[in-house]
Every structure is written in C-alpha cells, then in structure tokens.
Image: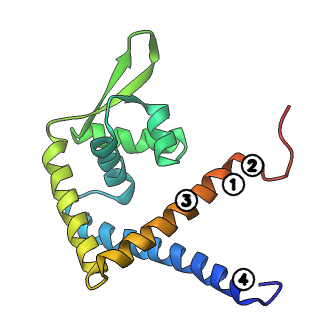
Amino acid sequence: MPDGSNLAQVRWELGVAIAQIARRWRARLDQRIAPFGLTEARWLVLLNLARRGDGIPQRALAARLRIEAPTLVRTLDWLEQQGFVERRAIAHDRRAKTIHLTDTARPVVLRIEAEAATVRAEILAGIPEEELALCLAVLKRVAAGLEGAEEEPVDGHRPG
C-alpha cells in the first residue's frame, strides 16, 4: 500500500481474502474427498472432464487445468490405472491422445459432486442470494481483469 489510501488497503485485503478463501475452500473439499482415494489433482481432472466435456486432447486438458503437460501425464497415469479415464489415439496424429471418462468414473464423479455441493452449502449458509449474486458479479470482473493481464508480457516486451 504505497500511497496509504483506503482504496489501496481494500484492494490489498481483497487479494489476501480471495487467496485465503480459495486455499481453505479447496482444502475443505480435498479433506471431504480424501476417503475416495483421490488427491486434489486427481479429482480436479475428473470434475473438469465431467463438467466441461471429455474427449479432448491431453494438451488441451492441461491448458484448461492450467498445469504443465508432464504433471498431467502422471495424474492421468494413475487415473487410467484405476480405470477412471482412458486415453485414445487421435486418428490423424497417433502421438496425441484424447482423454475420456469411463463408466467406472461416473459414480465417483457423482459422489465428488455431492460432497462439493455439501461443502458449498456449508460455507455459504446464511448469506442471502442477492449478496452471493453481487459477490459473483464482482469476482467475474476480477477474473476478467486477470484474463486481460495474462495476455500482457511480464517484462513489458512482446516477443518478435
């Protein structure tokens, strides 16, 4: 807070609050899903495939999850060994694979979704719908600001 203004203080506190809430929320959900034998990395892959569609290339899935491809490969190896996902070769590029949920994964995803809904209900209990809607609108604007910032180079220079 270099200028010591109230706005700078509020912005700083908001950033800290968002980071802490996200970390604690995921930790609570991770704790509830741990009995299923899934780590956060694993359940995030399953939920992403279930919610946003499977049958996508590994690289696209890594980009969706904002993780590096080698990190995803280890997670997919485990999920495939458990029978939760399968990799399929792409006809025009045998080196690339698409990722698909299996029938074995679907009941597990439903259990994860149920736990996630319970955690959300517990965390947000007592907050009126109007306040939640306003909060969501603000957070969407924050997210949009992040999207714009991600397009800008860190050092101020564009390659090329």
Number of marks in the rendered image: 4
Mark 1 is on which residue type?
Answer: Ala
Q: CA distance from mark 1 to mark 4?
A: 19 Å
What amino acid is at disc 4? Ala
Residue named by callout 3: 143
The three-letter amino acid code for the residue at tag 3 is Ala
2 to 76, vertically: above or below: below
Q: Is residue 145 above or below residue 152?
A: below
Which tag, 1 or 3, sits closer to the chain's start?
3
Q: Which residue is mark 2?
A: 152
Q: Nearer the viewer, residue 42 or 118?
A: 118
In the figure, is residue 108 to the left or right of 58?
left
* Amino acid type assigned to the residue bearing label 2 in the image: Glu
Q: Earlier in the sequence, mark 3 or mark 4?
A: 4
Residue under label 4, please give it.
8
Name the image quarter holding the C terminus. top right
- Tag 3 near tag 2, CB within 8 Å: no
Q: Could you give the CA–CA distance between mark 1 and mark 2, rounded to whole angstroms?
A: 5 Å
C-beta proximity under 8 Å, tags 1 and 2 = yes
Residue at label 1? 149
Q: Is residue 157 above or below residue 4?
A: above
